[in-house]
Image (cartoon, helix red, strand yellow):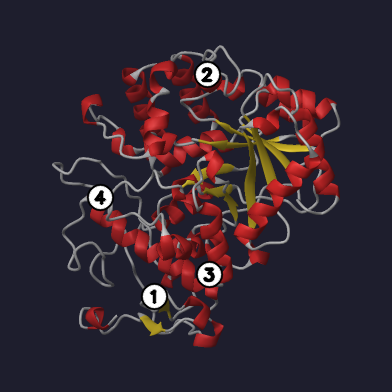
Amino acid sequence: ARAMTGLLPARTTWCLATRLPASFSDLTMFIIPVATTPGNALVRRDVRHSGRTARRSSRSPVIARANADADAKRASPADVTRRAVLSTAAGFAAGVLSNDRAGVTNTPSGGLVLPGSYLWPDAAYAGDLPSVPKAAAALKHTADVIPSRVIKGCWQLGGGHRGDPGSDRTSGNEAQQDFAPFVAAGVTTFDTGPEACGYGPSELVIGEALKKGVIKRSDVQIFTKLCCVGREQQNMTNEFITQKLDLPKRRLGVDKLDLVQMYWNDYGAKHYVDAALFLTDAKHAGSIGAVGLTNFDTKRMAEMVDAGAEISSNQIQFSLLDRRPEKVMVEYCVQNGIGLLPYGVVAGGLLSDKFLELPGEDVVLDTSSKRKYASVLEYAGGYAWFQTLLQVLKQVGDKHGVPIANVAAKWVLANEAVPAVILGARNATHVEDHRLLFSWDLDLEDMGNLRAVVDSGKLPKEDCYQYERGGGW
């Protein structure tokens, strides 16, 4: 803050630096806007990353600007809410990082546009973007399990997504603190799981964030998993379920799990129906809020529903690259009121501006997500088809002033079976992109253009997660 003081025009109403409450001891200093009108918010311009350092970016930078109106209504420090502080700080951080990545170098601060330096009439203020809303209704069989429409995926905290060290915040205190800006933006639901499902210490990270007061239990919902991958599949008991539910409660430091999503490795062992019924009993006992599934196909899901299990959701892979849910599952879920919670929505970042026009030999698969979803490309239509898809996504994005990843996520969100999508993140720089998702809509022309390119690829022949179990695509 001291370093910036000498650079600010005297006529501009800027901000005050203040210390946060003790519960935010690791976030020692934030810059808080003084004025309360929308104009004082940090500004997020439309930024699209070329992904090529050799090309100078012609895209507009992100602006961090305060209200320059000297007559604007002031707010006392006591009136500045924690939500406002964290939302502003998240936008500030996103602005600096986005400018650096986009190649914006003609700024006096090396990435941050200071007040009075650059002003555009079409600037989109972060304060004008909506918060991420909650789903329109509670999940089936519940009254209060209502996810935010974007769920923060915590697979990225499992250890295989560190990627670029300069932007990595997937472990330790940094990962804990990153939950706060998500909640401030309306992303109040987190998807996690145990080590057996590849989530590493993510439950512990969330638990520490709750313990330190970075986030409040009353503000969030935590979706975790029950992973059945061993001998328990041959001899499922209620005692096993009870034990497996107690562990995440201890790791998270909570009395109740909002949603428990069961994964089952061996379809040859039919006791998944028993497990679903035991979870339903746990729901009625108040131990969990809802029963969900992870990576089940339609046939097995129907078996559990027909047996009386109160299935609220199924978490599956669903994107413009993986349309397997459209084959039979979407229709079944709509008819039975079961919500689909898709992951892989932007294919680990492959569905983004960074990969547009990028030669296949230049693609770097530096995270578990990229490696996982890159394997899908050949089944979806191949790399040339993938580039055609990115071109259409960019045309739609340019029309609405949003990046490719926003269009890809919006396409999945538009499906009537989908109450929310899971978007993983290695840091909080995409928080404003999540908010941007709800500032625009795909129109009929957009949907038609996207459907045309999707249908020109390879259509799936099998249901969800059959390929991963050794079957066909």
N-term-proximal mark, 2 vs 3: 3
Which element is circle 3 on?
A: loop
N-term-proximal mark, 4 vs 1: 1
- As displayed, is residue 172 above or below residue 211? above
Q: Could you say which disc has been placed on residue 102 in the image?
A: 4
Amino acid at the residue labelled 1: Asn
N-term-proximal mark, 2 vs 4: 4
Which element is circle 2 on?
A: helix
Mark 2 → mark 4, Cα distance in angstroms: 37 Å
Mark 2 → mark 1, Cα distance in angstroms: 54 Å
Circles 4 and 1 in contact, beta carbons < 8 Å: no
Amino acid at the residue labelled 4: Ala
Q: Nearer the viewer, residue 302 or 76?
A: 302
Q: Which residue is under mark 3?
A: 214
The residue at 48%/76% (across/down) is 24
The residue at 52%/18% (across/down) is 467
Q: Which residue is under mark 2?
A: 467
Which element is circle 4 on?
A: helix
- As displayed, is residue 41 above or below residue 72? above
Mark 3 → mark 4, Cα distance in angstroms: 30 Å
Residue 228 x/y as whole percent: 64, 35
N-term-proximal mark, 2 vs 1: 1
Which element is circle 1 on?
A: loop
The quadrant where residue 216 appears: bottom right
- Residue 189 lies left or right of residue 162; in this view the side is right
- Residue 106 lies left or right of residue 146; in this view the side is left
Q: Nearer the viewer, residue 282 or 72?
A: 282
